[in-house]
């Protein structure tokens, strides 16, 4: 079956909602093809949304950073990956980073020094659904603050 694919993105109360469809060739012999519904012509709309998106965060050096991301679809479970400063993160590279089953990212023992700031930057989560496509979250800015001494 050959066909086409398309998506429409809507922003409703700060939430991005993606309506996607798959349109296949219709082999129906009916003469009423111009008045048929999307389901009759092979178009299927897919509910695919980001339920939680990462938010701008200020965290302390040595502390814990948590960025939330969760996606849902009626066509399966989306796979979540993270980007930092435009590059994909690999949880395998750094034992301080962990991704929860819902997609949220946690960084333990946040690092920050004058010349080394690996945890500070711009983060996005990307939710992918095989056969449908991917959606990208808003960009969250993570700032790391040094510990302050109270006297």
Image (spheres, rainbow, N blue to C red):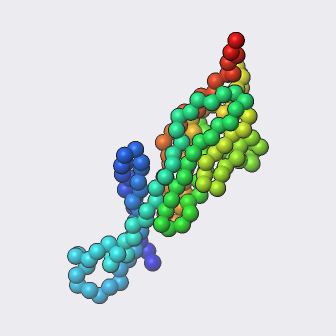
The answer, for residue 78, to whether it is visible in the render is: yes
Q: Is residue 81 left or right of residue 109?
A: left
- What residue occupies the far top of the structure in this picture? 151
The answer, for residue 4, to whether it is visible in the render is: no
The quadrant holding residue 130 is bottom right
- 38, 1: nearer the viewer: 38
- 64, 81: nearer the viewer: 64
- What residue occupies the far bottom of the structure in this picture? 29
Going 59% across and 42% down the picture, which residue do you hit? Answer: 67
- What residue occupies the far front of the structure in this picture? 151
Quadrant showing the N terminus: bottom left
109 in relation to 81, above or below: above
Q: State how many labels appear.
A: 0
Q: Is residue 76 left or right of residue 1?
A: right
Q: Where in the figure is residue 36, as x and y percent of width and height?
A: 26, 77
Q: Where in the figure is residue 44, as x and y percent of width and height?
A: 39, 70
Quadrant showing the C terminus: top right
Going 51% across and 45% down the picture, which residue do you hit? Answer: 53
151 in relation to 108, above or below: above
Q: Is residue 131 left or right of residue 34?
A: right
- 98, 23: nearer the viewer: 98
Going 64% across and 24% down the picture, which residue do you hit? Answer: 145
Going 38% across and 53% down the picture, which residue do you hit? Answer: 9
Q: Where in the figure is residue 136, as x and y percent of width and height?
A: 50, 48
The quadrant holding residue 77 is bottom right
138 in relation to 1, above or below: above
């Amino acid at each position: 079956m050959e066909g086409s694919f398309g998506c429409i993105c809507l922003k409703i109360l700060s939430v991005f909602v993606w309506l996607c469809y798959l349109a296949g060739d219709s082999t129906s012999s009916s003469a009423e093809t111009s008045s048929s519904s999307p389901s009759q012509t092979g178009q299927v709309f897919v509910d695919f949304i980001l339920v939680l998106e990462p938010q701008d965060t200020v965290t302390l050096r040595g502390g814990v950073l948590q960025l939330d991301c969760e996606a849902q679809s009626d066509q399966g479970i989306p796979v979540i990956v993270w980007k930092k400063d435009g590059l994909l993160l690999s949880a395998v590279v750094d034992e301080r980073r962990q991704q929860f089953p819902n997609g949220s990212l946690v960084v333990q023992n946040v690092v920050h020094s004058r010349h080394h700031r690996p945890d500070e930057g711009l983060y996005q989560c990307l939710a992918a659904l095989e056969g449908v496509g991917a959606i990208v979250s808003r960009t969250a800015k993570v700032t790391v603050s040094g510990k302050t001494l109270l006297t």
